[in-house]
Image (tube, rainbow, N blue to C red):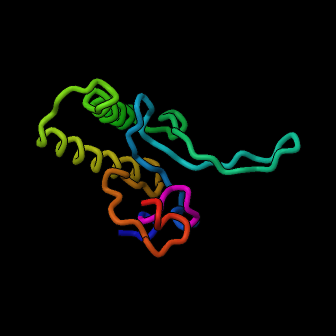
Amino acid sequence: MEDFRRHVLSCPRGRPPGVPRLDLAFDYGAFPVWAWGTIPAHGGRSGREVVGMVRPEELRLSVELATGLRTWSDWMDMHSEYGGGRLATDEQYRAWTEQGRKLARQLAEETGSAVVYQHDRGEVDVSCSYCGHRG
């Protein structure tokens, strides 16, 4: 696993130099792709980095991938405690997880970005002073 994947998105070590990083992560009702961007200095305010949801149109995703990502996210929304709360079997959750892995690979292929599938994030770099304790 690449080292950057062991860091939270907001950690400077979590973004490989020269390659944009996207995260695939479910969040209620949102399109499940997240990225960092820079807001330039303006009106006396200094520039700053922000993280936010990225729309499929901004990424120029294929219709197939955009639909797959929405469907993947909608499924979890319907089965999560704070969403629809529908019951699902362990097998259905495993299938959802595997679908997320597949979508993350497709997202990386279509965008050329380093993609982190947050459901599989695994162990964080505990030696990192920024994110080691945020795992």
Q: Is residue 93 left or right of residue 57?
A: left
Does 76 sit above or below residue 6? above
Does 8 sit above or below residue 95? below
Q: Residues in magenta?
A: 6-12
Instruction: Work out which residue is located at the far front of the displayed protein and give it.
Output: 133
Instruction: Work out which residue is located at the far right of the displayed protein and give it.
Output: 44
Q: Is residue 70 left or right of residue 93?
A: right
Q: Quarter holding the C terminus?
A: bottom left
Instruction: Work out which residue is located at the far bottom of the displayed protein and give it.
Output: 127
Which residue is painted at 29% across and 33% down in the image? 80
In the picture, residue 96 is in which quadrant? top left
Which residue is painted at 27% across and 48% down in the image? 102
Residue 133 counted in the magenta span = no
Does 7 sit above or below residue 128? above
Instruction: Work out which residue is located at the far top of the displayed protein and give it.
Output: 84
Q: Position of residue 113 (x, y in %)?
A: 47, 55
Q: Quarter holding the N terminus?
A: bottom left
Q: Tell me if I can see residue 71 in this picture.
A: no
Q: Tell me if I can see residue 45 in this picture.
A: yes
Which residue is painted at 50% across and 64% down in the image? 131
Q: Position of residue 125 (x, y in %)?
A: 43, 70
Q: Position of residue 116 (x, y in %)?
A: 40, 55
Does 72 sit above or below residue 107? above
Tally of marks: 0
Q: Main secondary structure of the magenta part?
A: loop
Question: For this rendering, which residue is in front, 7 or 65?
Answer: 7
